[in-house]
Image: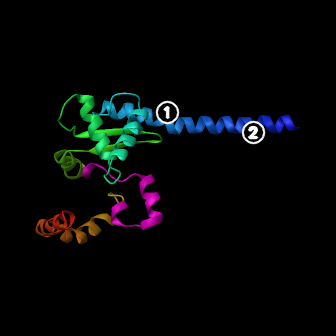
Amino acid sequence: MIWTVVWYLSLAVLALFAYLTYFVIVVPLRQRAYYKKLGVVFGKGTPFITEITRLKQLIAEDPYQPVLSRVATQLGMEALDTNVVPRLTGLCMPNRNLLFINSVDFLNDIYVKYNAFHTKSDQEQNIFAILGGRNIVFMDTHDKAYPPTRKSLSAAFFKSKLQALTKIIKEVTLR
């Protein structure tokens, strides 16, 4: 009887270990390979270890500065052996990959040129619907309510208003 319980407990522990190994290590490594094919620059060296070691170094140097984007930028420049910041860099962390857009032109392409061809994923809509309800940020772009809602908000994003807001934000941020 006791050996049966031990057997099932050991199977449960083994299954949990396999699950965690797959989702914490294997999935991020597969995603990293996919992103590298798309042109995202990751650092040289062993995934996870290189990134975590560099994070520790930068936190030790200055714990009050944001470090993730600095690590991604530095590792990307080292991978390309150049002083030019790559337009897309990535960090391969346990359980996820973090992507950093370092180019204003590239960001403009994503949000202005190609945004019309993309919609929010169902998973994203369902997760954030709990927190924010059915709002325009997580609304499907093919939803019938989306165009009138977007049109009603467009006045807030006129160029003249945004330029004035940008000036105020810069003044407050640079203080």
Q: Name the disc covering residue 9, or none.
A: 2
Magenta stretch: dominant SS? helix
Secondary structure at badge 2 equals helix
Q: How many labels were placed on the picture?
A: 2
Q: Is residue 72 visible?
A: yes
Classify the position of the C terminus by image quarter.
bottom left
Q: Amino acid at mark 2?
A: Leu
Pinpoint residue 53: horizontal percent, then vertical percent.
Answer: 40, 37
Towards the viewer: 88 or 58: 58
Answer with left or right where residue 81 lies relative to residue 130: left
Q: Which residues fall within the magenta stretch? A: 115-139
Outermost left residue:
160
> Percent from the top left, x then y, of residue 50?
39, 33
SS type, badge 1: helix
Q: Nearer the viewer, residue 146 or 14?
A: 14
Q: Image quarter for residue 145? A: bottom left
**Residue to which mark 1 is pinned:** 26
Check disc 1 and give the amino acid type: Val
Side of 122 relative to 164 (left or right):
right
Residue 137 is drawn in which quadrant? bottom left
Q: x%, y% of residue 84?
A: 17, 36
Q: Residues within 10 Å of mark 1 (few under 14, many from 20)?
A: some
Q: Residue at x 44, y 37 (%)?
A: 28
Left or right of residue 11, residue 22 in this image: left
Q: Nearer the viewer, residue 112 or 21?
A: 21
Magenta highlight on residue 120: yes
Q: Is residue 28 magenta?
A: no
User: Dot 2: within a 10 Å radius of its alpha carbon, few (fewer than 14), some, or many (20 or more) residues?
Assistant: few
Rendered location of residue 104, percent (x, y): 18, 48
